Amino acid sequence: MTNEQLDPEDQKLITLARAARARNDAPEAAAVRDETGRTYVATTVDLPSLTLSSLQLAVAMAVSSGAKGLEAAAVVAQAGMACADGVAAVRDLAGPGVPVHLAGPDGTLRTTVTS
């Protein structure tokens, strides 16, 4: 799949994650869209007492805002793989089959996995 083949709403998730990554100078950022179309964007948290991937945090933000499910997620990172714990968090909230798009820092889609 290429960026041109992505649903425009999924491409928006990549754009939001790219902007958050750049704004915070973070190694990775993620965005998720809940079942009502609301989006949540987060960057990685790496504190001595708390470590969360950007995808874990975006899912946590959705849950704390009342989301009951997710339609899609995107991660923008230099690394080539989405955090397994982050994909598991998507699956915990939304069940199997939710697309998680992984893009590079320039926004180019690398791969899509499902929860």
Image (spheres, grey):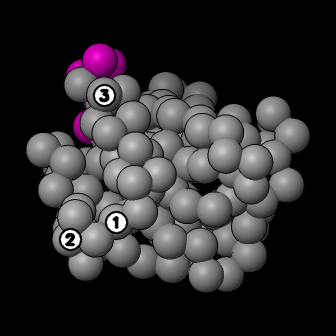
The x, y position of residue 70, in whole percent, is 68, 59
Q: Which residues are magenta?
A: 23-27
The x, y position of residue 65, in whole percent, is 81, 33
Distance from the alpha carbon under mark 1 to that under mark 2: 7 Å
User: Residue at horizontal 20%, vertical 48%?
Assistant: 107
Task: Say which of 90 and 109 sits in front.
Answer: 109
| Mark 1 in CB contact with mark 2 (< 8 angstroms) | yes
The x, y position of residue 91, in whole percent, is 67, 71
Task: Say which of 44 and 34 sits in front.
Answer: 34
User: Residue at horizontal 61%, vertical 81%?
Assistant: 97
* Residue picked out by circle 3: 19
User: Residue at horizontal 67%, vertical 46%?
Assistant: 37
Instruction: Please give left or right for residue 4 compared with residue 86 in the image.
Output: left
Q: Is residue 14 magenta?
A: no
Vertical relation: 46 (above or below) 107 = above
Image quadrant where one finds the N terminus = bottom left
* Residue picked out by circle 1: 6
> For the residue carrying disc 3, how many other residues have a C-alpha within 10 Å: few (<14), some (14-19), or many (20+)?
some
Q: Earlier in the sequence, mark 3 or mark 2?
A: 2
**Quick one: SS at disc 2?**
loop
Question: As shown in the figure, which amino acid type bears the numbered disc 3?
Answer: Ala
**Disc number placed over residue 2 in the picture, else none:** 2
Task: Say which of 12 and 70 sits in front.
Answer: 12
Question: As shown in the figure, which amino acid type bears the numbered disc 2?
Answer: Thr
The x, y position of residue 56, in whole percent, is 58, 49
Question: As shown in the figure, which amino acid type bears the numbered disc 1?
Answer: Leu
The image quadrant that residue 92 belongs to is bottom right
